[in-house]
Image: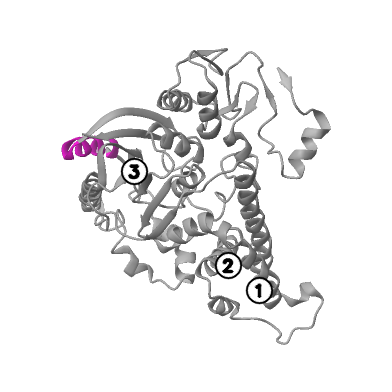
Amino acid sequence: MVANRKGKIMIGRAENGSQFWAYDLTYSESSDLTLLDNVQFIYELSLAELELMALGVDFEVTNCLREFKIKNKSKELNDEIVKRSSYFKTVGKEFTDYFHIIQKNRTRSVNQYLTHWIYPYKGKFHPQMIRALLNIMGLKEGDTVFEPFSGSGTVALEAQLLGINCVGIDISPLCVLQGKVKTKSIYVLDEIMSLKNDLIYKLKPSLFNKPSLFKEEHDFYRVLEDIKNETVRDFYMLARLLAVSDNVRRRRAFEQSFITNLNLMIASVKDYIDIANKLNLRPGKVHLQIGDSRKIELPNKSVDGIITSPPYSIALDYVDNDAHSLEYMGYKLNEMRVDFIGVRGKGKERIELYNSDMKRSYSEMYRILKPDKYGVIVIGNATYQGREVKTVEFTIEYMEQVGFELIHNINKIIFGLYNVMKKENILIFRKK
């Protein structure tokens, strides 16, 4: 093993944020490909192998399944693996782009690099898995991936990093806001910075050792209405909602939480810009909006791929989970429930309504996907009122019924005491 950095140098880099704590800078000189240190599970190795096959690599797994030999070596192939791969640390002695990207992490979680961490959201995708799936599907720069349940924006951000365009919809305005902030703030950082001190001063002037013209800003949020640039306004709106969430969930003081998270958000956007410049990334275009997966407003055969994880609303009430933020955004929860999939009805009726809604969504996915292209669904069997709901089996059966062919079914174990789901399936379909 060869170490590029040792001891105090590595600790120092980790502390200043330029080297993420979960990874070291060692690799095997005898290996053509070395897996990232956080690759631990069988499903990750399966995706890594599928990813290599999709990139045209003829390989052999060696050294306890952590290293690979390339049988069809070429500079062009090496460059492709360096630029696109998701589960590999090094190609020969060269670190992959993804290894450099994940160093830009302001959190303690290996999957929350760049802007992924912004706002707590249950049921997030692993970004590394999404990057791999985009490669497995054969999507290239300029192609378009669609996400009918865009959630926290993971697919949008990972597609953007690979130069793939993303169109996403979600019924939740909070989800759409998250995705927009994570992917669009890189274009307006200067304006975000120009407003920062003024907004903080209005919230807490004592931080600037200046007398306040008013004792307390009860309606600080109204200040946001004066921001003309929608992308900048969205950024500060989400910073506000992040402080609201911290206050409700963790009882943290609103003002301090707002300032702390605002500084971290700005630092993460700077990280994104820095790494994009360093690696000469050409970010894909992202378009996210409020929409209904049961009636997608896109033409027939118009997208090059689909990745999604349908809502686990039978087991997790998304409206209740984000009630505090949705109410602060001005929405009425009872009215929102009418449109959310999986939260209507009780008992058997609830499951029937969920299945009916998902059939419409899957049919729409088939309609808008181009022939011979791939649709990936990550889903697990939920437990409702003490009984297992066979969501995976239902999904496979109906997707095949509408014209999809199941190519791969990969089991993914979910660890964590408080997780609603204990296992998911990564279902890779191809439109016949």
Q: In the figure, is residue 147 to the left or right of 41?
A: left
Looking at the rendered structure, the secondary structure element under dot 2 is helix
Looking at the image, is mark 1 or mark 3 nearer the viewer? Answer: 3
Range drawn in magenta: 391-403
Mark 1–mark 3 CB contact (< 8 Å): no
Q: In the figure, is residue 405 to the left or right of 99?
A: left
Quadrant of residue 239 in the image? bottom right
Crowding near the residue tagged with mark 1, few <14, some 14–19, many ≥20 C-alpha atoms within 10 Å: some
Q: Which residue is mark 2?
A: 236
Q: Which residue is mark 1?
A: 199
Q: Which residue is mark 3?
A: 306
Q: Please tell me whether residue 418 is drawn above or below residue 248 in the rendered image.
A: above
Q: Please tell me whether residue 211 is drawn above or below residue 102 in the rendered image.
A: below
Q: Which quadrant, please, contains the N terminus?
A: top right
Crowding near the residue tagged with mark 2, few <14, some 14–19, many ≥20 C-alpha atoms within 10 Å: many
Looking at the rendered structure, the secondary structure element under dot 3 is strand
Q: Amino acid at mark 2?
A: Tyr
Of callouts 1 and 3, the N-terminal one: 1
| Viewer-side residue, 388 vs 290 | 290
Residue located at (61% from left, 20% from top) = 92
Of callouts 3 and 2, the N-terminal one: 2
Q: Amino acid at mark 3?
A: Ile
Mark 2–mark 1 CB contact (< 8 Å): yes
Indicate which disc residue 414 carries.
none
Q: Main secondary structure of the magenta part?
A: helix
Looking at the rendered structure, the secondary structure element under dot 1 is helix
